[in-house]
Amino acid sequence: MRPRLVRVRGNSMQPSFNDGDVCLAVPLPRRFLGSGTVVLLDHPALGLLIKRVDTHGANGVTVRGDNPRHDVGVQLGTLPWPQIVGRVVWSWSKQRR
């Protein structure tokens, strides 16, 4: 796996990330993906998503968005580890100063 640059779509991760922001995700071993870590995941129905890890265990992770009005993470349930593409380690936003 290699690093991935992705553009944020939507506002489920506001205020941390805004629509149009660009993020870099790098693959990391599971032990570095604890609660609170922002990850890029590849959901079979929804495609690439940026979310924050809520809980993690042997069977996978649960995730959530930062915007309480858009709680898609609860609807996703437990995601298996192979759906985690990597940890978001950098972002750029034209909205931040």
Image: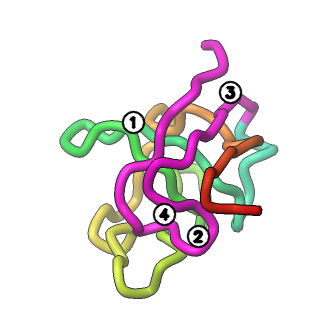
Return the residue at label 4: 62
Return the residue at label 1: 42
Rendered position, 19 above or below 66: above
Return the residue at label 3: 27
- Give the mark, 1 or 4, whose residue is nearer the N terminus: 1
- At a point 41% along the width and 47% down the height, the residue shown is 49
Splitting the image into 4 quarters, where does residue 38 fall?
A: bottom right
Amino acid type of the residue tagged 3 in the rendering: Pro
Assess disc 1: are there few (<14), some (14-19) or many (≥20) residues with their C-alpha within 10 Å of its C-alpha.
some
Q: Quadrant of the N terminus?
A: top right
Query: For residue 9: magenta?
Result: yes
Task: Give the residue furthest to the bottom.
Answer: 68
Q: Which residues are magenta?
A: 1-29
Secondary structure of residue under mark 3: loop
Amino acid type of the residue tagged 1 in the rendering: Asp
- At a point 51% along the width and 33% down the height, the residue shown is 6
Q: CA distance from mark 3 to mark 1?
A: 13 Å
Q: CA distance from mark 1 to mark 4?
A: 13 Å
For discs 1 and 4, the disc positioned in front in the rendered view: 1
